Image (tube, rainbow, N blue to C red):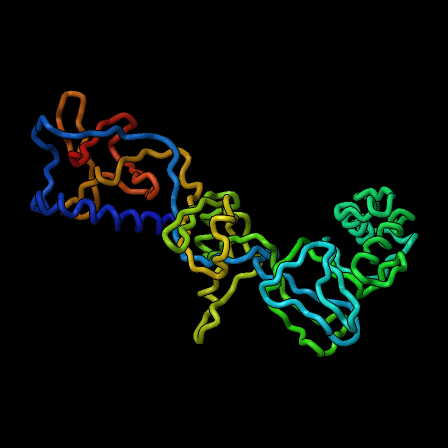
Amino acid sequence: MTRARSTAAGAAVVLAVTGVAMAASGGAQPDAVARTPAIDTVAVERGRLSAMVSQAGTLTYRAGPDGAPYAVTGQAAGLYTQLPASGDEVGCGEVLLRVDERPVVLLCGAVPAFRGLRRGAAGRDVRQLNGNLHRLGYDARARVRVRPGERSFTSATESALRALQRRRGLPVTGRLALGHAVFLPEAVRIAGVDARLGGPARPGVPMLAATSLTLQVQVSLDPSQQGEVEKGDRAQVTLPGNTPVKGRVTGFGRVARVPGEQGGRPADATVPTLIELDDPAAAAGLDRAPVQVDITTTGVADALSVPATALVGRSGGGFAVEVVRDDGRRELVTVTLGLFDTGRGRVQVAGRVAAGDRVVVPSR
């Protein structure tokens, strides 16, 4: 939200707080108030204030950097004879699907399969193959040592790949044919299936949509709110059943989204914002559940502030605070409001007040 929105939100809250005070005073506020012995006061503070952005969100599984699921595209040709179902989880090194009864194995890496791999090949795709063979233990099974950072397809790579092929039912050739494996960044959960059992498999045609196995929260911020929220900001997510879980902002989608409903306008575009939960297990089994998200933003680093309950509405508009001076006089001082820190219940003020001044608050 913009600073103006933050102030407006704070003013709305403090109006409710101060309405009773205005009614009790009949609306007229003198510049000085008679000395009264039994009062509660608090100090004007100088320091950091944080704003809060509150939004409805959706609990979902983490996917690509923009929040969209991974689009799984294969290179095998034939007919689909086995497909996963939505919600299935597939780990690195496991069989993802079958084409003409030949397994297509999921391997983990950022570089999509674009060529067959054999001894003598080199590159990033070979390095990620070596990493899989080592992490999955196939080099140990073959009694060889594959270095996970190695960019070259060595004799050790060939031996370890043969072990994987035997294990997963692929032709044992020591070469990775194009179409025998799909590379995705991590183990996945199937989000949707585009292919049809018995339908044709064609190279380059999307087969599946997949996400990670980790739950996260996605909220849609308007561009002005994104200006307030930064990567790393802390958040509280309220799950169904009123269960709070802490989290943090981990990123933003690269493309703004316009609501799909009829009449959606570019001005209504929102930016997907992703929140990682500190304890994802607390949200297990709640895929696509609606949640409430409160993001604490950076706010103002050095501000004078008072409790919202210290504000008094003035008859001509605006706000004041009642300051108890050193000589015991009580004086109404007009203040201008700034950022409202909903988490601490404090509001930024500017006027004839200083840090350490005592202001009157309602008695407890």
Q: Is residue 252 left or right of residue 263?
A: right
Q: Position of residue 357 (x, y in %)?
A: 24, 27
323 relative to 253, above or below = above
Question: Which residue is pictured at 40% across the width and 54% down the height?
Answer: 292
- Choose between 81 and 322: the one closer to the eye: 81
37 relative to 204, above or below = above
Question: Which residue is pictured at 68% across the width and 55% down the height?
Answer: 91
Question: Which residue is pictured at 51% across the width and 64% down the height?
Answer: 257
Seen from this angle, which residue lies furthest bottom? 199
Q: Is residue 287 left or right of residue 335?
A: right
Q: Position of residue 26 (x, y in %)?
A: 7, 46
Q: Position of residue 70 (x, y in %)?
A: 64, 61
Can residue 2 be seen here? The reply is no
Can residue 349 be seen here? The reply is yes
Question: Which residue is pictured at 73% across the width and 61% down the height?
Answer: 95
287 relative to 134, above or below = below
Q: Is residue 35 left or right of residue 174?
A: left
Quadrant in which residue 56 is drawn: bottom left
242 relative to 320, above or below = below
Q: Position of residue 118 (x, y in %)?
A: 89, 56
Q: Is residue 180 left or right of residue 24?
A: right
- Choose between 65 and 95: the one closer to the eye: 95
For the C terminus, the quadrant is top left
Seen from this angle, which residue lies furthest top? 327
Quadrant in which residue 37 is drawn: top left
